[in-house]
Image (spheres, grey):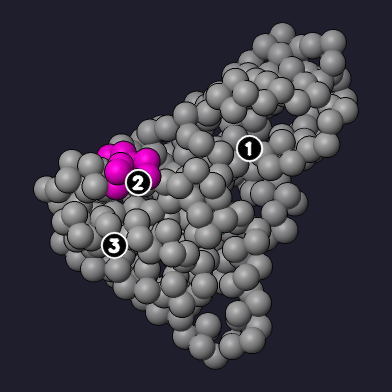
Amino acid sequence: MKSSASAPAKAILFGEHAVVYSKPAIAAAIDRRVTVTVSESSSTHVTIPSLGIYHSSERPAGGILDYIGRCLELYHDSSPLEVTVEMEIPAGSGLGSSAALTVALIGALDRYHGRDHGPGETAARAHRVEVDVQGAASPLDTAISTYGGLVYLDSQRRVRQFEADLGDLVIAHLDYSGETARMVAGVAERFRRFPDIMGGIMDTVEVITNTAYRELLRNNTEPMGELMNLNQGLLDSMGVSTRELSMMVYEARNAGAAGSKITGAGGGGSIIAHCPGCVDDVVTALNRNWKAMRAEFSVKGLI
Ligand code: PMV
């Protein structure tokens, strides 16, 4: 028996890290997918052609293999399984490859076992895997990979899907990740040392995210760039930017972007830039040193 499912990667537009402190966030699914196929086999093993990794169950796990292992523990019986993962996004680029992989694997396992859950249950199961593997995770990444489109996660953790024209956006990524769990732990440590200051920063990110949400609902993308710049300043204050991420952010602005910021956990990974009328200029400028692309959004979630 064999079954497959795929789920999109994502870009966080506003509110990363603050979302871990129950603040709202906005994320969009991007048109790069992770496809997982599971099939009966004589031994359990994982094949990831795009990474050139072949992992048998005897080898130590690590990175995205931890997510696969935890999914199998929770949502599969002990029968041997071949798991094949095709990724259109690099792992660790801050574009939510682990969440997309987790959602797609849960979808493929549900089909394999003839289970039929609604998206709410799938997102909750995937979130559990992320929490188990990372120690802390908001439900944002797994929600967007499950539902697709655009999602506003409110402060009560309710997922609100909405439609808006996001305008011209560019994403550029490094080929290394800051490791989400490590970055989240770094922010938590700063919070412990300076609770009043960090509390104020998180409150201000909340105002930025809510302002962006309100304007997007009115299809007004004019302030997006400036709001991204404001959010970036606060991500820098949280300690999640790096010299290279700041260089990317400023390169985008120099090439004409109205605004730019880290997307995701920081420390490595990706930036996003709002580029009305200047997508090609910004992609060209960023491509000199990094890998950049126009961000195409996906309405399709788990399929
Ligand atoms: O590393 P990413 O792109 O999946 O982003 C993580 C976003 C954080 O807010 C830092 C953590 C979380 O669980 O929401």
Q: Nearer the viewer, residue 135 or 149?
A: 135
Q: Nearer the viewer, residue 119 or 23?
A: 23
Element type where label 1 sits in the image: helix
Q: Residue at x 27, y 40 (%)?
A: 294
Q: Dot 1: within a 10 Å radius of its alpha carbon, few (fewer than 14), some, or many (20 or more) residues?
A: many
Asked if residue 233 can be seen in this view, the reply is yes
Q: Nearer the viewer, mark 3 or mark 2?
A: 2
Q: Quadrant of residue 189?
A: bottom right
Question: Of label 1 and label 2, which has the lower sequence position?
Answer: 1
Q: Earlier in the sequence, mark 3 or mark 1?
A: 1
Q: Which residue is mark 1?
A: 102
- Residue at image mark 3: 250
| Residue 24 visible, this angle | no
Q: Is residue 293 left or right of residue 222?
A: right
Q: Residue at 53% of width from left, 60% of height from top?
A: 267
Give the CA distance from mark 3 to mark 2.
13 Å
Which residue is located at x 30 percent, y 42 percent? 287
Circle 2 sits on which residue? 289
Circles 1 and 2: CB distance less than 8 Å?
Answer: no
